[in-house]
Amino acid sequence: MVKLKFSRKNQVTIGIGLFILAIDFFFFFGEILFVPMIAVAVTVAWLPFWLDVFAENKRQKELETRFPDFVRNLTGAIKSGMPASQAVIQVSDTDYGSLMPFVKKFSNQLEWAMPFHKAFVNFGKETENPVIRRAIATMIQAEQAGGNIEDVLTSITDSLIEIKKIKEERKSSIHAQVMQSYIIFFVFLGIMILIQNLLIPYMANFGDAQDSGLGITETSSGNLNLDASLDFSSPLNFFKSFTVWVVSIKGVFLFLALIQGFFAGVVLGKLAEGDLTSGLKHSLIMGTIAFITITVAQSI
């Protein structure tokens, strides 16, 4: 699980977000860009937190990629006749990318005479990677059950490589579907805007025309709440106007677009990489685009 850190970078971006929000209230209040600028301010403020999540997710994937290399080198060193502890120390000089600090610590613990199994378990825990932890737990259990450590490490390496190939094949095969999903989402937004800005006002005007000529009132524009807007003059007025705005055409269409963007992104992440966290980046992109696009269209 990703641990969010409130660093200096986060403080700076939150300050920038508040600055954009202040500019929005002073210069764009009541204008077309007022609500979209709020979305920009919020996005700037929380962007570093999302970037930390994505960076940690990328680092974990690199750990999974480099771990088979480490195990393969370790297996070769053990097969050459070295004890397991000495083999780890021997292969720790190889570059394993993001895995290198954990390998070095693993080697240092063995040099200080820590038992191999305990140091290996600590190695898995410190990476905070479920795939690596499961592989290490499997290796230790298999060895304790009487298996040969060389054969166990070889089997684990083969399994990890096979899992990596399956993930890469799934990601490459789903790439076209990812592009199609984005195109479908943009088409969905376009249809929403057409219905919101053209079709519904036309139906409302048509209803008004029938009302004046035939006395039919069921489709009057008043029942459609086309002109609901938020009142920022005071917290109480904002709350009252928000309750009206949520059930208006504007509120319903905006929430429909946000819901569509969120779940479409989550599904894309699950299909492409088998991880819901990976889908959050798609959800964030789609949700931000949907919010800005729909609010600008509503203001026109």
Image (spheres, helix red, strand yellow):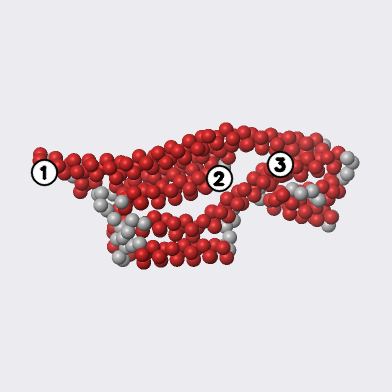
- Left/right placement of residue 242 relative to residue 64 reads left
Residue 144 seen from this side? no
Quick one: 114 or 161, which is closer to the camera?
161
Q: Nearer the viewer, residue 247 or 291?
A: 291
Amino acid, disc 1: Ser
Q: Secondary structure at mark 3?
A: helix
Task: Where is residue 174? Give x, y as percent.
Answer: 55, 35
Q: Identify the residue at horizontal 81%, vertical 43% (top origin).
A: 74
Which image quarter: residue 256?
Answer: top left
Tell me the element at label 2.
helix
All told, the count of numbered labels is 3
Q: Mark 1 or mark 2: which comes first in sequence?
A: 1
Secondary structure type for disc 1? helix
Q: Are marks 3 and 1 in contact (CB under 8 Å)?
A: no
In which image quadrant can residue 145 be found?
top right
Quadrant position of residue 80: top right
Q: Which residue is mark 2?
A: 278
Residue 95 against residue 157 in the figure, above or below? below
Nearer the camera: disc 1 or disc 2: 1
Sequence-first tag of 2 and 3 = 3
Identify the mark at residue 135; answer none if there is no mark. 3
The structure residue drawn at horizontal position 57% and vertical position 33%, both measured from the top left corner, is 173
Which residue is identified by label 1?
A: 212
Three-letter amino acid code of the residue under disc 3: Ala
